Amino acid sequence: MRSAALLLLLAACHDWREHVDPARVTAMPEQTPLDARPMELHGERLHIRLTPRARYRVKGYVAETSRELKHTKFHLSKRYFSMRYEPPTVVPLPREFGRYMSNNHLVPANAALQAELDRVRIGDLLTLEGRLVDIEIKDQAGRLLMRSPTSLSRDDAGNGACEQLWVEALAIE
């Protein structure tokens, strides 16, 4: 599984961020409910069940989480994404700014999509399409190793706020 933090709208930028055009990313992600059967993936040691919850399309800039974006600091720890705005003497970002950011855990639907995801670089404008999925992983004996629901909201934060996307199509602009 590969993670990429997508920043959907950006203000002032440096280095690669100087080339960011917020006008190219003006829409919120498109999400429609989906009632589909779970997908079962079997490996030698693991059994993975992906339960589709919604169709999803998102367009945004890929941001490196360990660098600053002007006065905004990003942090990715395991599966959790956070940001903070510094210094406090600077006018802070509006509270709703977080709605324009998402931490996407990407599961490519096939090897060709995996190869495309491997080409993605910090600063790329990326469009992803697929299905938001809940993930459940069990070992060979059927013991639950991990259960992780996907976020279905743009207003959540913290544990469970990540979008887990079964990527069926992508475009790097």
Image: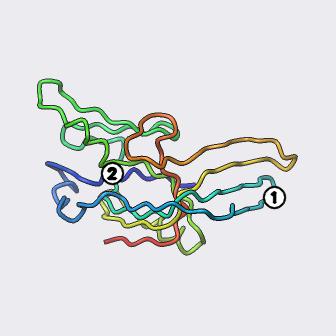
Q: Residue at x 36, y 41 (%)?
A: 66
Q: Is residue 21 above or below residue 12?
A: below
Q: Give the residue pinned by disc 2.
A: 63
Query: Where, quadrant-wise, is the C terminus in this rendering?
Result: bottom left
Q: Residues within 10 Å of mark 1 (few under 14, many from 20)?
A: few
**SS at badge 1:** loop
Q: Residues within 10 Å of mark 2 (few under 14, many from 20)?
A: many
CA separation in Å, label 1 and label 2 = 34 Å
Q: Position of residue 148 (x, y in %)?
A: 61, 44
In terms of depth relative to the viewer, which is nearer, 146 or 116? 146
Q: Give the residue pinned by disc 1.
A: 44
Asked where in the image residue 157 lies, by quadrant, the reply is top left
**Among numbered discs 1 and 2, the one appearing first in the sequence:** 1
Does residue 150 appear left or right of residue 70 in this picture? right
Task: Name the kind of residue labelled 2 in the image.
Answer: Ala
Query: Where, quadrant-wise, is the N terminus in this rendering?
Result: bottom right
* Residue sitting farthest toward the right: 141
Does residue 86 appear left or right of residue 145 in this picture? left
Q: Position of residue 137 (x, y in %)?
A: 71, 48
**SS at badge 2:** strand
Task: Name the kind of residue labelled 1 in the image.
Answer: Glu
